[in-house]
Each structure stands twice: as structure tokens, then as C-alpha cells.
Image (spheres, rainbow, N blue to C red):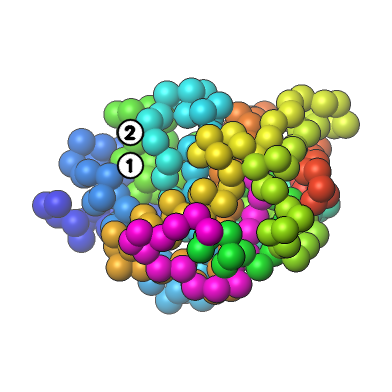
Amino acid sequence: MKDFESALEDFWQARNGGTYPNRWESAMSAEDACRINLALIERHAAQGERQAGWKVGLTSRAVREQFGLPEPIFAVLYEMGRWQSGKEWPRDALTRPGWENELCLTMGETLRGPGLGLEAARGAIASVAPAMEIIETRGPVGLESFNTMLADNGQQRAFVVGETKEFDPARHDLGNTSVEVFIDGEPQDKAFGSAIMESSPITSIQWLANQLAKFDRSLEAGQVVMTGSFTRQFAIDRPLTAEARFDPFGSAIATFV
């Protein structure tokens, strides 16, 4: 990509309150966008913003069809964005926010692709927690701006995590895990983990490790992974309490005021 360093600087400035870098929409490939996003991990670290792990997005047909986007993506989670379930958050501090209903998996072993198999991914998971991803629509959404969204960390803002439980592959079938979504106590939607990659959240782990290998990176032990939304994305367009109730793992709850 021409002017990689200029693009990198523009996306960094955008994260620090600058103008959203629309001018790069037609100037980069998806690979360029991923490399920009990965390069910014070091800039965050220099400011004391430690990486927590990764998110996998656009894993369900419901979300891809909602926004007309073609394929899964990965982006970065930072410790500053880890929000405890049950707390209140100021809605006005967010940019066109929404949330997605996901499991958050913690890795017990490091995974390195390429060619990583599903059983290796399953065996590397240490724990699982009910979660919600908080997203911000900071720029346009659509095929024309897909790569710009990737470079802007895939709309990631925060992730709300409930109580963590040890993962037991003999007892926990993540493909059969269900989620019920509530707004202010009223039911909105229900879906199953089989919506993730048309298989299971474990397939997200496998996919992520193999994707990271293309950029000479690994999925490290201790990192967390938000594995993708079971359901469509919901807008935070008014004060509300959102709850994602996962069977058998419990709830993630966030109130926006």
C-alpha cells in the first residue's frame, strides 16, 4: 500500500479524537487494513493501554445480512474496554452505539496457525463467560467502507463480561448454548451458538488463530476472545438496560443512562 505510514497516522489520530479517515476507503486492501490495525497495538501499549485479546466479528448470518457485509473479521480488545457486568455507562459518551450478544472465551494455551484444527482450538479454551460487545458506528457501514472499518478496529468500543466459568469440553457444547436477549426486562430475541460460523464459537477460535498466522501472530494463552454475536446487532438509541442471558453460563448486563 502506498502511504502506509500516512494512513497509520490518520487512523491513530482518529482514535484520539481526530476526523474519521474516510479518504482511505479506496486506497487500501483488507490486508492493508488489518496491518494498520495491528500496528496500532504498539501505539496503544506506549500509552499504557494493554491488549486484552481479540474479537471476531460478522460471524453470524444475522449480522452479515443486517449490514450487507461479506465475511468474518478480527479486531483487537483492550483492557481499558473491559466492562464489568451490572454497571451503568453514559450513553452520550458513545458514538452511535450498539451491542452484540457473545461468549467471551479465555485461552489456556497458545494457538498458532496455519492449519490449526478444531479439536486443538477446543482443547485450548480455559474458561467461558457471558458477554456483550459494545460497538460504535464511527463511520459509514457497507461494502465501500468495509476496509476502513477494519482499520478502525472493527467498530470495537468495549466488552461487558459476566461471571467466568471453567470450560469443560465434555459438558459444554457451545454450539447448543442459547442466548435470550432482553431490553428493560422485555424479551427481544433468542439464538444458539450454532449461528456462529454456522457451527460454534469454537470455530471462531480456530478461524482466528489461522487468520493471525497470516500476520505472523499467535492467539496467546491468557488472552480473551469475543467470538461473535449469536444475534443481530441492537442499537443503544435511548436509555435502557440490556441483558444477554446465556444458558448455561449466566448473564451479561449493562445499563446505559
Q: Along the line of sight, which residue is nearer the eye, 152 or 252?
A: 252
Would you say residue 137 sits in the magenta stretch?
Answer: no
Mark 2 Cα-neighbour bin, 10 Å: few <14, some 14–19, many ≥20: some
According to the picture, the residue beneath numbered tag 1 turns out to be 148
Q: Which residues are magenta?
A: 95-119
Mark linked to residue 145: 2
Mark 1 Cα-neighbour bin, 10 Å: few <14, some 14–19, many ≥20: many
Residue depicted at x 60% and y 29%: 232
Residue depicted at x 85% and y 31%: 184
Image-based side of 166 in relation to 16, left or right: right
Q: Quadrant of residue 117?
A: bottom left
Image-based side of 90 in relation to 107, left or right: right
Quarter of the image where the C terminus is located: top right
Residue 136: x and y in percent read 54, 41
Q: Which amino acid type corresponds to the residue marked 1 in the rendered image?
A: Thr
Residue 177: x and y in percent read 72, 42
- Residue situated furthest right in the rendering: 185
Would you say residue 117 sits in the magenta stretch?
Answer: yes
Residue 74: x and y in percent read 43, 50
Q: Mark 2 falls on what kind of element?
A: helix
Residue depicted at x 76% and y 55%: 171
